[in-house]
Image (cartoon, rainbow, N blue to C red):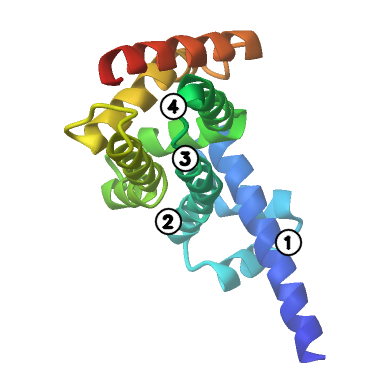
Amino acid sequence: MEATAQSRSARKRGAIMDAATQVFVDKGYAGTSMDDIAKLAAVSKQTVYKHFADKEKLFAEIVLATTHRADAMIDLVADIPADPDRLQENLTRLARQFLTALTQPQVLQLRRLIIANADTFPELGAAWYEQGFERVLATLAGTFQRLADAGLLRIDDPLLAAHHFSGLLLWIPVNKAMFHGGPRHTQDELDRYATAGVTAFLGAYR
């Protein structure tokens, strides 16, 4: 009986977080009320407050809950073999997967929401960056160091190289999305950015 109650409570908590994510994205932090979230989650406002003390704590929880998405990306960037004959092919495959993952509509919407509230919640924005994308960059830096140790790359600062690699890929599509709203790219465009970015990166670091 207790397990059933806990399961019901967990489902309600999940429904509240899903609803809150959607409402925050649609209306922004300032425009969102706990009433809006309760209505979309199909629970009472009292139930929302039972799980989350206030709107700020709910916002923080949904933001930090998304950092686990970085785990799959970390596995991806850590798994580049030191194969000199297929280095460009392997990096281009990584670049395409990297771009596809980081330009998903939900990822872009959340990024925009966090940036919009960075002045209000600077510690939350920093935590989201450190627990998410910064971990990916650190892993990518380790991969580049491994490739450099194998003689495939020439790198003095692997973390800076990781920033250069991601910047070459993300600058165009992410900036378009941030300023225009919504994804402004096709898969063919993403593939072209991936190919061109890897070519430029290897021109500097191989």
| Foreground of the two, 189 or 16 | 189
User: Which tag, 2 or 3, sits closer to the chain's start?
Assistant: 2
Q: What's the residue type where badge 2 is placed?
A: Glu
136 sits to left or right of 12: left
| Foreground of the two, 93 or 104 | 93
148 sits to left or right of 171: left
User: Which tag, 1 or 2, sits closer to the chain's start?
Assistant: 1
Query: In which quadrant of the rendered view does residue 140 lie?
Result: top left
The answer for how far apart the CA atoms under marks 1 and 3 are is 41 Å
- From the viewer's perspective, is the residue at label 2 or at label 3 nearer? 3
Disc on res. 127: none
Q: What's the residue type where badge 4 is placed?
A: Pro
- From the viewer's perspective, is the residue at label 4 or at label 2 nearer? 4
Residue behind mark 4: 84
Q: Is residue 16 above or below residue 125?
A: below
Disc on res. 77: 3
Q: Is residue 168 above or below residue 100?
A: above
Q: Residue 146 placed where, x, y %?
A: 34, 42
